[in-house]
Image: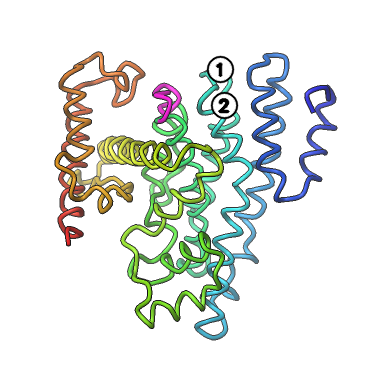
Amino acid sequence: MGANDNAATTRAFVEESQSQERPELLRILTKEMIVNPAKQIELDDLITQEVRSALEILNDKGRHSSQVGSGTNEDQIRNLVKLANEDWEAVRPFCYSLAVAARWGTRDSLSPWVAGIKSIVSAAHKHHDGYEAINNIRHIAAVAVLAVAALACSAHSKWENFKILLADPSVPENYHVGSSIGVLDATGYWKPFDTSSLLPTIFMYAETTGDDPIEILRKYDDRKIGKLYTPIPDWLHSVMKPIFKWSEEEHTQNYHRSEIMLGVVGQDIAIQDALMNGHNLEYARSNWFGRCTWVLRHASKSPIEQMKSELLRDGSSWAPLQAGLFGGNMDRASKAIDSYNNDYHQLSRSRAF
């Protein structure tokens, strides 16, 4: 692969590869090409092609039609879990490449992944005719790409890349012509499924155990398993392990760190979006409350409080501020942390049993 100088041949090779091989292939090619300036155009074309392939699936109205919700209750559950899995598989190769780019890319080289993130989030966020519950499943893909970028950047303290990939991009707002909304405000952990239903829990168990969704439902009915507090963050924590290949302990620590940064930056973006669009700040809330709200609910010091301590200790030299997050403004960062912390503690207290 490294000796292949024909861009068209490389793209064809990736396009014709087996679906299970593409994620690792994209990772390898990204590692080889992102550090080589002579390969930037070829890599750009390769990522653009991959995003285009994913969007064909995400924008396929037939796949997200009312037929998914037809049949018996068991048929519907199987169909919805299958659809969510297909939407994840559509972006999985892009995610493997994104994990490399988020760590090793620079402002000058990250544009293909920024464009990909915006396109995938937009495909989920934009209005689609039909059943909302079915259309919203596209958010599985949107949440996955943002979570992968956040984990790669946070684990290696690549805060400038975090800003470029996650804080800066925006997509068109659906109901205010000419307005835009930050990608972290346009999607979130609770967007893919109705949070009151059992479906996200069934999806998480089906994806991580390989069990049939109906068998999982029966286990729930028999009280062998319970409804999960944070099924989508739990699923992400599991499916991202092969992408990063850390030890279990490293993976969990890095994942939780990325959740908190997603949450706080998401809070800042929600506040800025509300200010820009003239919305009530009372409703400017982050979409990113994950596993930390229950896994770390008994911690003597919450990860949000730890972040606030770092900000107070380092002041304007705090690394995320130096990278331009929160507009480089300490007061703005402090306000985002405090606002997020209030909601975080409410959720944690509700799970403290």
Please provide the residue range marked out in magenta. 155-163
Q: Quadrant of the N terminus?
A: top right
Q: Amino acid at mark 1?
A: Asp
Name which quarter of the figure residue 70 lies in.
bottom right
* SS type, badge 1: loop
Q: Is residue 222 left or right of residue 38?
A: left
Label 2: which residue?
Answer: 111
Name which quarter of the figure residue 8 lies in.
top right
Residue visible at 58% across and 66% down?
Answer: 82
* Of 352 and 43, the residue lying toward us: 352
Residue 6 locus on image (x, y percent): 85, 25
Q: CA distance from mark 1 to mark 2?
A: 7 Å
Mark number for residue 108?
A: 1
* SS type, badge 2: helix
Taking the magenta stretch, the answer to whether it contains residue 315 is no
Q: Residues within 10 Å of mark 1 (few under 14, many from 20)?
A: few
Say if mark 1 contacts mark 2, CB within 8 Å. yes
Residue visible at 16% across and 37% down?
Answer: 338
**Can residue 179 be seen in this snapshot?**
no
Residue 249 locus on image (x, y percent): 39, 40
Q: Residues within 10 Å of mark 2 (few under 14, many from 20)?
A: some
Q: Quadrant of the C terminus?
A: bottom left
Residue 152 locus on image (x, y percent): 47, 32
